[in-house]
Image (spheres, rainbow, N blue to C red):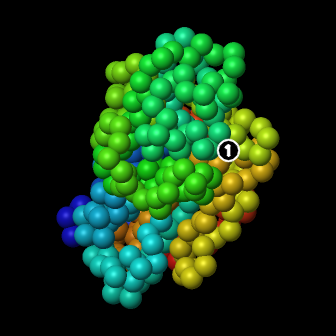
Amino acid sequence: MGAVAALALAGCAANEGGTPPTGEESTSTLSGELVGAGASSQEVAVQSWAKGFQTANPEVTLSYDPAGSGAGRESFQAGAVAFAGSDRAFKVDEIAAGPFDACVDGSGIVEIPAYISPIAVIFNLEGVDTLNLDPATIAGIFAGTITKWNDPAIVATNTDATLPDLAITPVHRADDSGTTENFTDYLAQAAPEVWTYEADGEWPIASGEAAPQTSGVIAAVSGGQGTIGYADASRAADFGTVSVKVGENFVPFSPEAAAAVLDASPFEEGRTEGDLAVELDRTPDGEEYPIVLVSYSIACEEYTDAEAAALVKPFLQYIVSAEGQEAAAAEAGSAPISDSIREKALAAIDLIVTK
């Protein structure tokens, strides 16, 4: 079982309250190694969660490889890691096809929306810090039909900006990415007349520049002039950013605007009790920010290695706790999940079998 087999516990009691009060020693009896992999968008949040969880459980070592959502799902299916982070849920047909080697045959999987963040459209253009763009213009830029920064479509919504006669270099992810799937889902829903491709974790056309993982996109946009890309908003501080047209308004990204989209969207039909996949509405008409990433934490309901469950379960409980969500918000700028989502997430996590 690889990394899952590395788990070794002194006991099964979990400190579900998060970090111990200042000056008090932890009474946790958990010990061992907990290994996960997946979405690079979650990297900063997972670092904050690991810090809090390991403070409460000092004999636990937690590691996470931000290899990308697709790699994380593959590693989880292969049983190489105990949990995965993914910027999209498994599709129903993927779950039916399997396999999930870390899970007992017939076990369901748990998928909880643990990390909510805007996907920022970031750019590097000298003298310009913000732009207002409508969905069709964003789609045209990334489809390669709008190729200059002084294109009339960009000028029309940015009359106060000095836009140069400079080529646009759109940057997209080279790897199978949940961030890409969320971004292309937005383009497909909000500008279907321009973006004529289905949502996909792999960039669907030969255009622009490809870069691996979130860090690669950040480096490529930073290293060029006239570049534009998309990335988790926690990485957007050093760039110009886009306010997106929603209804009659141009809405900048914010955690609050991103969280509003999740709460307004239904759960997908045809899912099991512990599978909280959300069907995001990308075309709101209020103050919601529609290019939002909902990243999932994924686990087995029943593990082939029972010791894995005894670490995964309390870790996921900490992730969705108010304390865990506030820690991620402070470090990564994510949006804490609502109380109603937390209640459903805790019920899903409670399905994980421990012995």
246 or 320: nearer the viewer: 246
Name the residue: 70% across, 40% down.
245
Task: Name the residue beneath numbered marker 1.
Answer: 289
Residue depicted at 44% across the width and 65% down the height: 298
Up the image or down, 345 lies above or below 318; here it is below
- Answer whether residue 15 is visible to the viewer in this image: no
Residue sitting at x 73%, y 59% = 264
**Outermost residue, bottom direction?**
106
In this rendering, the answer to whether 239 lies above or below 133 is: above
Q: Is residue 170 left or right of residue 192?
A: left
Residue 245 located left or right of residue 18: right
Percent position of residue 255, x then y: 65, 41
Front residue of 21 and 343: 343
Q: Position of residue 248 (x, y in %)?
A: 79, 41
Q: Amino acid at mark 1?
A: Tyr
Which quarter of the figure is the N terminus placed in? bottom left
Residue sitting nearer the eye, 167 or 40: 167
- How many residues crowd mark 1 within 10 Å: few (<14), some (14–19), many (20+)? many
**Quadrant location, the C terminus:** bottom left
Q: Is residue 224 left or right of residue 143?
A: left
Vertical comparison of 278 with 36: above or below = below
Quadrant assignment, res 204: bottom left
